[in-house]
Image (cartoon, rainbow, N blue to C red):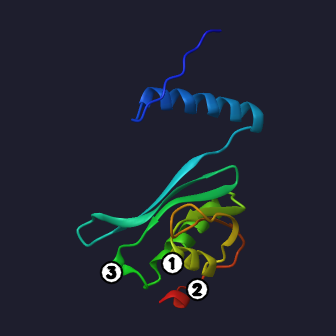
Amino acid sequence: MHYTIELSDGADESATTAILAGLKDYNLHRFGPADWKELVIALKDEDGKVIGGLSGHTARGWLYTALLFIPEDLRGQGLGPKLLQMAEDEARKRGCTGAYIDTMSADALTLYQKCGYEIFGQIAEFGPNYAMTYLKKLLQDAKVSESEFS
């Protein structure tokens, strides 16, 4: 088989689609169905405009929170824990047994730990003044009290 290798610094949707399709096919045959399902919890203002929220997915019995954003003026009101709890509750309904998340923010790290997440890995030199931290949580019936964060 002859092939070429091409580097691109821009988005190439057809290449990304082909790579993802190959990886999904490999994973399906190697590990079985992933039961991948998107999960989005939108935080909206009074006009219905999305101003923050949580985005992720469930697959292989785990919830992955890819994005969690609360606008600066709404922080400290328990919205982060509330969105995490909502996502975890939905994940349990989907049969998930765990959740994971990553962050570069020291504030977010503290929040996630208060919500029961434990560090399982870290890249200390990810940036000049920050680390990339990976956290996980086994999903049980325990819930986070919003009053802890208000």
The reply, left or right, for residue 148 in relation to residue 134 is left
Amino acid of disc 3: Asp
Could you tell me which secondary element the residue under label 1 belongs to? Answer: helix
| Residue 69 drawn at (x, y percent) | 42, 68
The reply, left or right, for residue 86 in relation to residue 25 is left
Count of labels shown? 3
Disc sitting over residue 73 in the figure: 3
| Residue 10 drawn at (x, y percent) | 39, 35
- Measured in 3D between alpha carbons, the distance from the residue under mark 3 to the one under mark 2, in whole angstroms, is 21 Å
State which quadrant residue 44 falls in.
bottom left
- Measured in 3D between alpha carbons, the distance from the residue under mark 2 to the one under mark 1, in whole angstroms, is 18 Å
| Residue 124 drawn at (x, y percent) | 62, 65
Q: Mark 1 or 3, which is nearer the eye? A: 1
- Measured in 3D between alpha carbons, the distance from the residue under mark 1 to the one under mark 3, in whole angstroms, is 15 Å
Q: Which residue is at a point 54% across and 21% down the rendered structure image?
A: 5
Could you tell me which secondary element the residue under label 3 belongs to? Answer: helix
The reply, left or right, for residue 130 in relation to residue 97 is left
Q: Earlier in the sequence, mark 3 or mark 2?
A: 3
The outermost residue toward the front is 128
| Residue 22 drawn at (x, y percent) | 61, 28
Amino acid of disc 1: Asp
Q: Nearer the viewer, residue 44 or 128?
A: 128
Indicate whether 23 appears above or below 109.
Answer: above
Q: Earlier in the sequence, mark 2 or mark 1?
A: 1
Within 10 Å of the Cα at label 3, are there few (<14), some (14-19), or many (20+) other Cα atoms? few
Judging by the rendered image, the residue that carries numbered circle 2 is 145
Amino acid of disc 2: Ser
Within 10 Å of the Cα at label 1, are there few (<14), some (14-19), or many (20+) other Cα atoms? few
Judging by the rendered image, the residue that carries numbered circle 1 is 107
